Image (tube, rainbow, N blue to C red):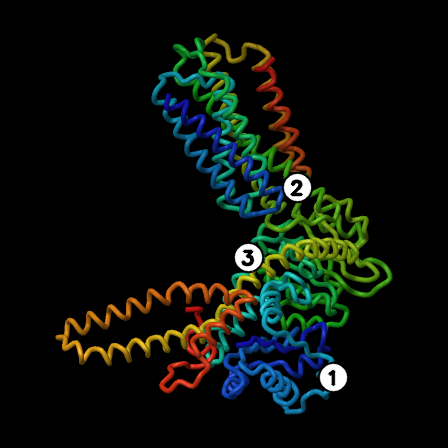
Amino acid sequence: MKLLLVGMNHRTAPLDLRERLAVDEPGPVLRKLVAGAEIEEAVLLSTCNRVELVVLTREIEAARLRLRSLFRRELAPDGAGPAEQELEASLYEYQNSDAMRHVLRVASSLDSMVVGEPQILGQAKDAYRAAVECGAAGPILGRLFQHAFATAKRVRSETRIAERPVSVARVAVDLAAQIFESFAEKRALLVGAGEMIELALRALRGAGLEAISVANRTAERAARLAVQFGATAHGLDELPSLLADADVVLTSIGGVAPWLTRPLAERVLRARRGRPMLVIDIGVPRNADPEIDALDDVYRYDLDDLAAIANENAEERRREQARAESIVEAEQQRFDGWFAALRAVPTIRQLRARVEAIRAGEVEKALPRLRLDDPAREAVDALTRAIVNKILHAPLARLREEAEREEGIAHLETTRLLFALDDAEPGSTDSGPGGGDPEPA
Amino acid sequence: MVVGVLQYLTAGLYLLASLAAGAGFTLARPAMLRAAVGVLAAGALAHAASFTLLHTAVAAPPLTHLPSALSFMALVGTVGFLLLAWRARLAGLVALVAPMSCLGVAAAVFSGPAAADGRIAGTGSLPHAHVLLASAGLALLGLAGLAGLSFLVEHRRLKRKRLVASGAWPSLEALDRAGAFAVVVGFPLLTLGVVTGSLWERSATGAFFSGDPHETFCLIAWAIYGVLVAVRFGARQPAARCALTSIAGFAFLGLAMLGVELL
């Protein structure tokens, strides 16, 4: 049995291609895949940054062709898949150990656009759940994904890879959390209605801030954001009165001079009676006069300050990434050992069947001559069974151990040769490589 | 005997809490800080048990003995912190509270058993009321000072545009509220301590005020802290200035009340 992973991500494929091939409902795709003879199990992970299929197969070449054909013709909803050249440049492929490592790295957020971001683990869990629900994920991919989730948990608890925010919006939320005890009764004022403001607004909403006012030059854009996020829309002329109630101010509007001047801030602070105010100025040129830094109750951060924090945090994450990679490496080797031991399963099963057939045949021949009553016949049957089991126990255990190593393949071959397991045997109970119970018996 | 064992246990638990808090703060691990708060709470239980046993075993426990008073202050400060940490995100403050509590108990443990104070005889419950109220007030004002110190460190860091891993340190708002709460409860207790001290003086000597250095400095320190409290709540100072006030006020109180005792 082989593991095969084929996919594309934010590093290999442009956004428009990822968007075209993104799969909202993986069930039908997965059912179709496992219905074919070449693929035993399959999981499809589709997020805004990646589309990946990991499959278990006995025929690696056939599976490769099947997955490539899927990417080329079947994933695009209108059937108009990408051109051959575009697809070849975007797809990557991993087999066995490399595929395992990739799954572990993805779940641990080491392959993400923002290393350490937490969403990917939930997305991987959803992808696995969807595969289980439609019957596409079996015991081996199940084991791989459970191992990946455990590895991700280890990475998060043993390293600090996810601790520090690296986006401007998340840094703003963290700054607010270091000033305010809770966002429940706080009010945010957003000045402007651009993309950065929207991102920050999403992050603040996600952190629990509910009372939000949006002020903008053009009332329509402010109204659009206000409707989208359940905020109130205002004109810029209302800023002084809005400021008095605002605990978090996010500003990004064009203009030559800063609108939040020191005299205005002083006036507002008097009205606020000592309550602190966080000012996130992401405007270029700056919207808040740096002189307001001198006021005790104002904490002002401009784009450079936020970028410096974000960069410092990204550097910290990179340092932690090396530790996370070594955890992934160790976990991949553990899974690799388990997966390799599966190679011994067909040989062990065949050997047991062969020996059992011999034992049963010989007992069957001997019993009529012995003329035994029923309890005695059962005792003979149990005796021969016990002898066979005891003789086989040590060699089978050794075979399982050896199968975890690359050299173990030679032992498996020798066993098959010595016991003639590849010779045609009428009535053999072999269910084929990897069939049935996936545990290394 | 049991009191001694409990005191050693308390000191050990406070020390453990200090080490865990120090590690949690240095490594920015909120889970370690929360664990330190748990250990501190266990220490406070042992501390309360030893204090209760001391009061049931001895008719007039030697609380006027400075190390015993420090130990009691450590208990009140610790319980005050635990109550605040239960209501707000203040676990990070354990990095300052636990070492202070540990020092307070260590003073009692290593100073040995105190001799009974002759001045207490025949003066009823006033000496106890004085020491308990003044110590509790001082402990809470000390807690306000620690919250103020933490606030200023955090305030300066944010003003210098630095961000630490979230969750490792309390928010400015939580520190400000904790400081205000400690002052609001601590200052009236201290005031009652001053009043009961004067009544004790009167029952012992016939005068409310004898003019000895301890009384003089305590009265001046109480009056100065009173002015600071009035300015803090009356004039709605910025939180950073309130924090500075709490530190300066407690430093002066500590110097006046404990420094004079030690001299």
Horizontal arrangement in the rendering, residue B145 relative to residue B64 (left or right)? right
How far apart are the two marked residues, 3 and 2, measured between alpha carbons? 41 Å
Between disc 2 and disc 1, the foreground one is: 1
Image coordinates of residue A193 in percent, x first then y, are 73, 69
Residue A314 in sight in this render: yes
For numbered disc 2, what is the local secondary structure?
A: helix
Marks 3 and 2: CB-CB under 8 Å?
no
How far apart are the two marked residues, 2 and 1, measured between alpha carbons? 60 Å
How far apart are the two marked residues, 3 and 1, measured between alpha carbons? 37 Å
Three-letter amino acid code at disc 2? Ala
Between disc 3 and disc 2, the foreground one is: 3
- Taking the spot 49% from the left edge, 28% from the top edge, the residue there is B136
Image coordinates of residue B211 in percent, x first then y, are 58, 10
Horizontal arrangement in the rendering, residue A243 relative to residue A41 (left or right)? right
Residue B180 in sight in this render: no
Vertical relation: A323 (above or below) A368: above
Vertical relation: A247 (above or below) A415: above
Same chain, marks 2 and 1?
A: no
Tell me the residue that label 3 is attached to.
A154
- Taking the spot 62% from the left edge, 57% from the top edge, the residue there is A326
For numbered disc 3, what is the local secondary structure?
A: helix
Tell me the residue that label 1 is attached to.
A86
Tell me the residue that label 2 is attached to.
B239
**How many labels, in total?**
3
